[in-house]
Image (cartoon, grey):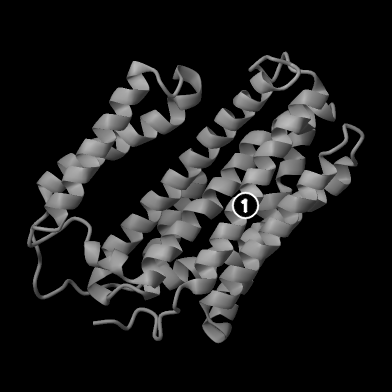
Amino acid sequence: MPVGLAGAAISWCVLPVTQLPERRGRFDGFGAVLLVPGLGALMLAVNQAGTWGIGSPAILASGGAALLLLGLFVWHEARTADPLVSLALFKRPAFGLGNVASLLANAILFALFFLMPFAYQRVFHQDVLAAGLYLTAIPIALAVLAPLSGALSDRMGYRALCTAGMLVAAAGLVLLHTLLASTDASVVMITLALALIGVGQGLFFAPNNNAIMGSAAAAETGEAGGVMNVTRNIGTSLGIAVAAALLSWQLRAGGAAVASTHLAPPAELLSAIRLVVAVLAACALVAALASLVRPSPAEPNTRK
């Protein structure tokens, strides 16, 4: 709460006063009625797939409801005069591909936050406090690099930094995958690999956010920011859900034949974690490709 209150006070003092547009559209209430439960059903299906089973009636019902509601939402938004989300934004490659890369980057980040405590505690026998401290390597590296990459993006452009960031993250994930091949691996080296991933994420996030917002017109910044936040949240949920599902599947398929991290032998647990890390490395490469092929906005935030 103190951090939130401090952020609110700083925002009030720092953020510039914006002028309301001459033409104010009506709030798309019907679109909101479709979007909110649609996203809720999608998140429920994604988060509970590993627990309830992909083929369970609850998951099938949630997934079907999400497809129906979100499909109706897209249909409605394409036809209403004042859409909640302008679908025209997604016709711009810088916006669409930027959000795809953001979703993958957030999925990678939070999948690691989910996975690595199991490795530190169950395999390398670290206590809870030590595991938490080791994990701070990622956010510390991200926090140090993000302001620098944001400033550099104004000079170098977005594409190079975003692509380089995801390639560095992919290299860190490959290094982590290699180190996790042995239960005798150095905890320090594993933490350094996490820091390298954090460096890549730090290089990526600020320029990518700038590129997404820069592809939107001045009157669309609210919609663009909302879509960016929703994409980030979906990536977070997908990362944790997919990591949990893959981990559980590999533990069942492996020699341990159990789904619980508490019952699995350390070697089997480490093998399952390595599988998920390999998938995350592939996601980082896809995000790098999306960053590479998208065009950069010529003049951020100057579209009319």
Residue labelled with disc 1: 282
Q: Is residue 122 left or right of residue 212?
A: right
At x 77% / y 45%, what residue is drawn? 177
Residue 208 on image: x %, y %: 49, 67
How many marks overall?
Answer: 1
Q: Nearer the viewer, residue 11 or 51?
A: 51
> Relative to the observer, which residue lies in front, 47 or 145?
47
Q: Find numbered disc 1 in the image and state the secondary structure of the residue it sits on.
A: helix
Q: Position of residue 150 (x, y in %)?
A: 55, 73
Q: Is residue 116 left or right of residue 245?
A: right
Q: Residues within 10 Å of mark 1 (few under 14, many from 20)?
A: some
In this orientation, which residue lies closer to the viewer: 12 or 73? 73
Q: Residue at horizontal 63%, vertical 73%?
A: 148
At 33% across and 56% down in the image, what residue appears?
Answer: 227
Q: Which percent across, then down, holds residue 12?
A: 37, 63
Task: Classify residue 138 as left or right of residue 154.
Answer: right
